[in-house]
Amino acid sequence: MGETEGAGAPGARRRRLALATLCVTMFMSMLDNVIVTNALPRIDRDLDAGISGLQWVAEGYSLVFAALLLTGGALGDRYGRTAVFRLGLALFTAGSAAAALAGTVGTLVAARMLQGVGAALLTPGSLAILRHVFTDERERTRAIGTWSGVSALGLAVGPVAGGPMVEAFGWASVFWINVPIGVAALVLSGRVLPAVPARARRLDPGGLVLSAAGLAAAVHALIEGPERGWTDPRVLTAAVLALLLLAAFLLLEARIAEPMLDLRLFRDGVLGGALLGGFAVSFGMFGALFFLPLLMQGVLGWSPTAAGLAGLPMTATIVVAGPLSARLTGRHGPRLPLVLGIALCATGLAGLSLYGEQARYPGYLWTLFVLGLGMGMTFTPVSIAVLQRVAPERMGTASATVNTLRELGGVLGIAVLGAVLTHRLTEALTERLTRLGAPVEAVGRADGTPLTGGAGPAPLPAPLREAVEGAFTEGIRLALRCGSVALAVAAVLVALLLRAAGRPAAPTGAGAGPRPGVRAAAGAGAE
């Protein structure tokens, strides 16, 4: 085993401070997936980014985060999870400062990628350190519930906090906010986090190169495809490269003794279902959270503050749903809350797609409550499933896999749903302009610049403006429906995979029987 659970367990006050440190850092890393969304229109206005550039601002963080998470888990296992956690926190904080100071889109994307490197190093160790700090099974389960709830809360608070900050202090403020928090967390981590023992393992440089290059090629093809055309040689080349590189990555991981991505995790139906659930929710929800601020500010005419505060009902519901999900998981296992949460997310996206440019907030308010309840229900069951089914020495790799699939879901959600939106926007805009007898050039670039407030053309005449807004709304509605269908399919698959949730299983990677006390602890009262 890589670590001794009971050795040197910290005192109660130190455990609480350690939990607070881990929660704050996870909150920041999750927050940065989405806090930038309400800043996108202002970034476009100041840096003239366009939809494609804005997608890279959002994707630059998530892409590197997803590509390096498995490597972060492996580095933590080899060099000590606490040391790698602190290094990641320092890089994340430095990347935040660089993003706040960026003067061009390219510099901003590079800084976002540095943030992603830091987040990829600190995130895998977080759950492993938590397991080392809390040795009592029941107390550990409560701590994981809190940690998971805070992670979900970061995704919900981002758009809410981002709007007022952007309006009051400019878009750079969504990055500056991380700097003092990161510095404080670095100081606190040096005082309260225990040194988790390293274990000897080989690194997987081949897997790192293949996975990072494959994901980058896939996202490039999905973002550039709608703008350049799906038959463009560069887009086709990127798509073929992505398929070849990712296939080679999976073949390599299946052959080596200590892979970055442990494919054995997917042989366990419960773990496979939990991993699919985390991926699916990120796929649908990240896409929605990326495009909704553009709709609210560009089409409905909301200010950044109003668009941010509109998400408060979803945030409040996530806070309520987190503890409820933990209780349901303890009583019934991960299947019920996870499937219910995914189904609620699918329902919320489908409901939101019914509203267009004439939408009024009270009319679609119910969808925000449904989405918040769905998101809040999904985080804890995934973490508990991993804790129940994975041996302690593989916890770092398993945690990295969970977070990789979550981030990968977000990356692909923004890219795929963005491709759907851009394709439908171009089609609908061409149709509407043809009916008006106006050329496409009349509205400048057909990438949404007029909607996001970019430094492009002068204000459009009313008929052209209505054509652009209507086409953009059509694109968003189709993207939301596609996300809803994907989530509905995932809910069915997860329900089937998690049918075995109540059956005892040997922890993955350990050849022994079930770990005593884990299921009882999840049940909050049995042992």
Image: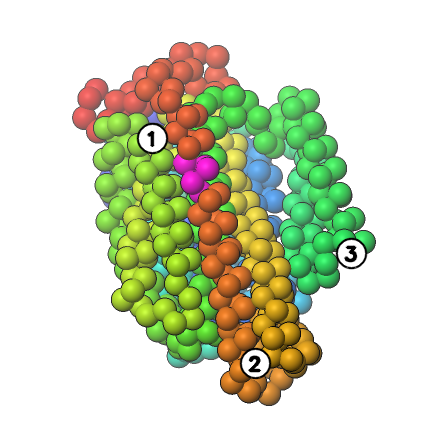
Q: Which residue is mark 3?
A: 232
Q: CA distance from mark 3 to mark 2?
A: 29 Å
Q: CA distance from mark 1 to mark 3?
A: 44 Å
- Circles 1 and 3, Cβ within 8 Å, touching? The answer is no
Closer to the camera: disc 3 or disc 2?
Answer: 2
Front in this rendered view, residue 117 or 91: 117
Could you tell me residue 203's position as x and y percent? Answer: 65, 33
Q: Say which amino acid is labelled 3.
A: Asp
Which quadrant of the view contains residue 68?
Answer: top right
Q: Which residue is mark 1?
A: 334
- Give me the residue at 36% from left, 41% from top: 343
Which range of residues does the magenta coloring cover?
A: 487-491
Would you call the spot at circle 3 few (<14 residues within 10 Å), some (14-19), or many (20 or more)? some
- Circles 3 and 2, Cβ within 8 Å, touching? The answer is no
Q: Earlier in the sequence, mark 1 or mark 2?
A: 1
- Give me the residue at 72% from left, 46% from top: 239
Q: Say which amino acid is labelled 1.
A: Pro
Q: Earlier in the sequence, mark 1 or mark 3?
A: 3
Would you call the spot at circle 2 few (<14 residues within 10 Å), some (14-19), or many (20 or more)? some
Element type at mark 2:
helix
270 w.r.t. 72: above or below:
above
- Residue 464 is tagged as 2
Could you tell me residue 75's position as x and y percent? Answer: 58, 37
Which quadrant of the view contains residue 142?
Answer: top left
Secondary structure mainly formed by the magenta segment = helix
Give the image's coloring scheme: rainbow
Which quadrant of the view contains residue 45?
Answer: bottom right
